[in-house]
Amino acid sequence: MTQKVSDEKLGESFRHDNRKNGWKLIEDASEMIPLPVNQLALNFFLSGEEDCISGEEVIKCAKEMQVNFGQRQAEYLLKHQEEIPEDWRQYYLLFPGTIWRTRRGFLAIPCLFCFKEDQGNDSGWHFRFFCLDNAFGRQFRLLRPREYPNRVGYFSSLEV
């Protein structure tokens, strides 16, 4: 459900628009109306005894399972963070439906995360980009529509 887009097509549609920093938008998920938090569920994407997978594998899994929410969904959740379940705070939420190329040529995807209260930072949700060169392990999750059927394969559904 992603489509290649030109930078001009999106205009000012992102709150966190890195084009002003020299980044280039490579792909963007086509969902235009983000889902409310109560219609979403977490997905764990590692299988068996894997400790982590590459960013490219995360993208592949999300596309194959059609759960590749993008930056619009991430920004919607950030704006409505008081509705995000408390249990989700322990995870980094990935949004691989939007892919950016940094000025240095790295590919990056949006992510939401919380600091632990004992880290001395604002304990609310924060937005940032994760480079696809990183390994993505057990603390990362994708989102799927709550009513979406759980398919055996890449994802283990974790209802929250």
Image (cartoon, helix red, strand yellow):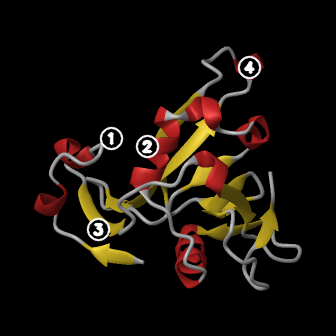
Residue located beneath label 1 in the image: 16
Q: Quadrant of residue 61?
A: bottom right
Amino acid, disc 4: Glu
Label 4 close to label 1 by CB (< 8 Å): no
Q: CA distance from mark 1 to mark 3?
A: 15 Å
Sequence-wise, which precedes: disc 4 or disc 3? Answer: 3
- Please tell me which residue lies in front, 71 or 40: 40
Amino acid, disc 2: Glu
Crowd rating for badge 3 (residues with CA inside 10 Å; few <14, some 14–19, many 20+): some
Is residue 129 visible in the rendered image? The answer is: no
Q: Is 143 left or right of 116, judged from the image as shown?
A: left
Callout 2: SS: helix
Residue located beneath label 4 in the image: 117
Sequence-wise, which precedes: disc 4 or disc 2? Answer: 2
- Please tell me which residue lies in front, 24 or 75: 75
Residue located beneath label 2 in the image: 75
Whether residue 66 is situated above or below residue 130 in the rendered picture: below
Is residue 120 visible in the rendered image? The answer is: yes
Label 1 close to label 2 by CB (< 8 Å): yes
Image location (x, y in percent) of residue 48: 87, 77
Q: CA distance from mark 4 to mark 1?
A: 25 Å
Callout 1: SS: loop
Residue located beneath label 3 in the image: 26
Callout 3: SS: strand
Whether residue 113 is situated above or below residue 157 in the rendered picture: above
